[in-house]
Amino acid sequence: MIEWSDEGIVLSARRHGESAAIVSLLTRGHGRHVGLVRGGAGRRARGLYEPGNRVTAAWRARLAEHLGHYACELAESRAAQLLDDAARLAGLAAATALVDAALPEREPHARLFEGLDGFIAGLCAGAGWPAAYVRLELDLLADLGFGLDLARCAVTGSVDELAYVSPKSGRAVSAAAAAPYRDRLLPLPRFLTAAADAAVPAADILVGLRLTGFFLVQHAFAHQAPAAARGPLPAARDRLIDRLQRAAA
């Protein structure tokens, strides 16, 4: 028998049979890990397995390659804190769905666990979460081995006036160096290179999401067939973008 216990963040839960659920957690030490929860879709457990909730989880299986069974206890109910705020709830849904879809199973990603945990804590606290969401997508790319280099210009080495990103190299380019071929580059919003967070306009958040979305499609989701006409990225992310577009209009 294989057994372990760990901290986890609920990414998704789907009904299996009459009352069981297949639950996907991002755990601190075991990465994204899926298991069966008996009674997980029942009335008593329904609130426990809401995406974003933090749990303590015990997993056991006869063999390591088996699906295995989870027994979880609620450590912090976060989804319930956002029920009265549709925008922040959309941010939570997008974050958990993206991590669930992008990460391979059973690979440790302790840094991303901390990043997602911190993002959700900030989301529950209130302001500034859209910019933090874009940075979470950058962290996800980096953890998967496709990190962007936004520290200095790829052409001149300058750290000033970084305004674009090369779609080929993922490196920043300054406004001056980009002038001859900026129509082939991706815009880089200033808040991703600024030292401090001020209020970030919704239009700039959308520019950041187009940037991260390009590299997510090219790298993290390149092996996946499109799930819908809009592409392979999770529908929850599309819904978040739709909401932000309405706010920017």
Image (spheres, rainbow, N blue to C red):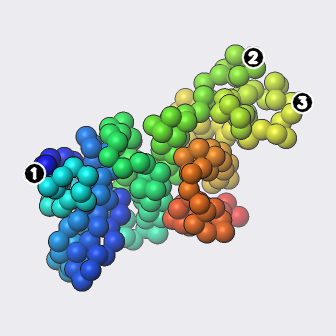
Residue 19 drawn at (x, y percent): 22, 80
Which residue is denoted by mark 2 in the rendering?
156
Q: Type of residue at label 3?
A: Pro
Left or right of 231? Residue 50 is: left
Residue 20 drawn at (x, y percent): 22, 75
Point 62% across, 29% down: residue: 150
Along the viewing direction, whichever of 189 and 200 lies nearer the viewer: 189
Image quarter of residue 168: top right
Question: Does residue 172 sit above or below 95 in this rendering?
Answer: above
Q: Type of residue at label 1?
A: Met
Mark 1 and mark 2: Cα distance apart in space: 57 Å
Mark 3 and mark 2: Cα distance apart in space: 14 Å
Quadrant location of the C terminus in the rendered image: bottom right
Mark 3 and mark 1: Cα distance apart in space: 63 Å
Residue 246 visible somewhere in the drawing: no
Secondary structure under badge 2? loop
Which residue is denoted by mark 1 in the rendering?
1
- Which of pointers 3 and 1 lies earlier in the amino acid sequence? 1
Residue 180 badge: 3
Left or right of 185? Residue 179 is: right
Residue 13 visible somewhere in the drawing: yes
- Which of pointers 3 and 2 lies earlier in the amino acid sequence? 2
Left or right of 163? Residue 243 is: left
Question: Does residue 10 sit above or below 107 in this rendering?
Answer: below
Number of marks drawn = 3
Give the crowd class for mark 2: few <14, some 14-19, many >=20 residues within 10 Å.
Answer: few
Point 54% across, 46% down: residue: 220
Image quarter of residue 192: top right
